[in-house]
Image (tube, rainbow, N blue to C red):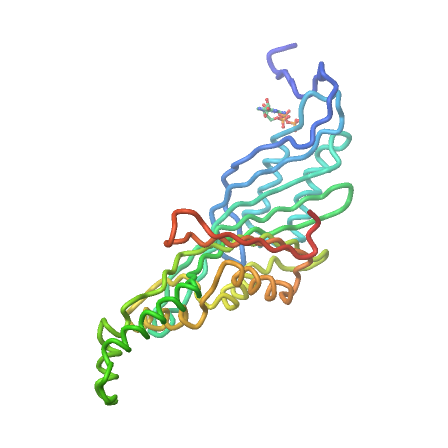
Amino acid sequence: MNALTLPDVAAQSSQQAIALEWVGMCGIASPVLINGQRLSAKIDAGVNLVDATARGIHMSRLYLALDQLETENLTPALLRQLLQCFLDSHEGLSNKAYVRIHSDVLLKRPALVSPLAGWKSYPTSIEASLKNGMFHVELKILVSYSSTCPCSAALARQLIQRQFIDDFANTSLQHADVLAWLGSSKGIVATPHSQRSAAHLTIRLEHQFPQLTLETIINNAEGALGTAVQTAVKRADEQAFALANGQNLMFCEDAARRLNTVLQKSSGVEAFKLKVVHAESLHSHDAVAESFWNWEV
Ligand SMILES: Nc1nc2c(ncn2[C@@H]2O[C@H](COP(=O)(O)OP(=O)(O)OP(=O)(O)O)[C@@H](O)[C@H]2O)c(=O)[nH]1
């Protein structure tokens, strides 16, 4: 070996002839373009190693292939092209390629009533694989929302009725008195509990679907729930939010069913699994429901 030759350990033979399912790098920092928006991402890139005797894969080839994500809008076609690059650069070594892109999608959200708006972040993973020519894309999205317990609401209403009986026993009802009572703290002697809740959506896109449809899926999910967590809030918005919660009382089962229904109708969705987590304020554990559609378990 002269001074200009660099040792290449990856080109050596492995002493243990064992194939590997996934080899690559996790947590690569890179900008990505999602719907024209430049976002910070962490990327996991890998291939399998079918040549059981090869010592290692070529990490740098995977790393450099990620360059195209910096300038081209993220689409299923681009992900497929990227994975094909992984395989082309590992001919004879690999027949499966994987990429996972973790980012926070940012969407500008209008307030419910006031003319304000603010940014909301949706933790998202876009996962794609190319295995023996079969291409799959999965989206994982976290949508946060508010859920008010319907049972607690019914129990609170009963207490309000009891208070009404106590306060208006043996009196003739006067509209003005009832109105004043309703506006007093006695008129709402009990309140139902509500909680910040999380919908974890895992969606497999249809083959050949041209877009990642992240924003549409988020909009559909928030529309079905009716109580998306807000950004900029004035009192008028808070009042509208209180009304939205009252009109969308939800057990975790209700939320899971609403999401199931809307996702089944969302274009490009081939299969999904979803999990909703209501971080209960009634107790210190969570109420959780899961629902699958076309998802083999
Ligand atoms: N395969 C492998 N490479 C590693 C690992 N940790 C660090 N590397 C380094 O990743 C670097 C890039 O590997 P290669 O892509 O094979 O680099 P190269 O041989 O200069 O590039 P090519 O000529 O394209 O093969 C090398 O310096 C490796 O030593 C590891 O766990 N596995």
10, 124: nearer the viewer: 124
- Asked whether, in this view, residue 116 is left or right of residue 260, the answer is left
Q: Quadrant of the N terminus?
A: top right
- Asked whether, in this view, residue 268 is left or right of residue 170, the answer is right
Image quadrant of ligand 1 equals: top right
How many numbered badges does the structure rendering display?
Answer: 0
276, 269: nearer the viewer: 276
x, y percentage for residue 95?
75, 36
x, y percentage for residue 277?
48, 52
Name the quadrant containing residue 121.
bottom left
Q: Is residue 54 above or below residue 45?
A: above
Q: Is residue 162 above or below residue 22?
A: below
- Asked whether, in this view, residue 162 is left or right of residue 40, the answer is left
| Residue at point 22%, 81% (across, down) | 180
Q: Is residue 162 above or below residue 80?
A: below
x, y percentage for residue 153?
39, 67
156, 196: nearer the viewer: 156
- Which residue is outermost to the top? 1
x, y percentage for residue 253?
54, 59
| Residue at point 36%, 73% (across, down) | 240
- Asked whether, in this view, residue 271 is left or right of residue 157, the answer is right
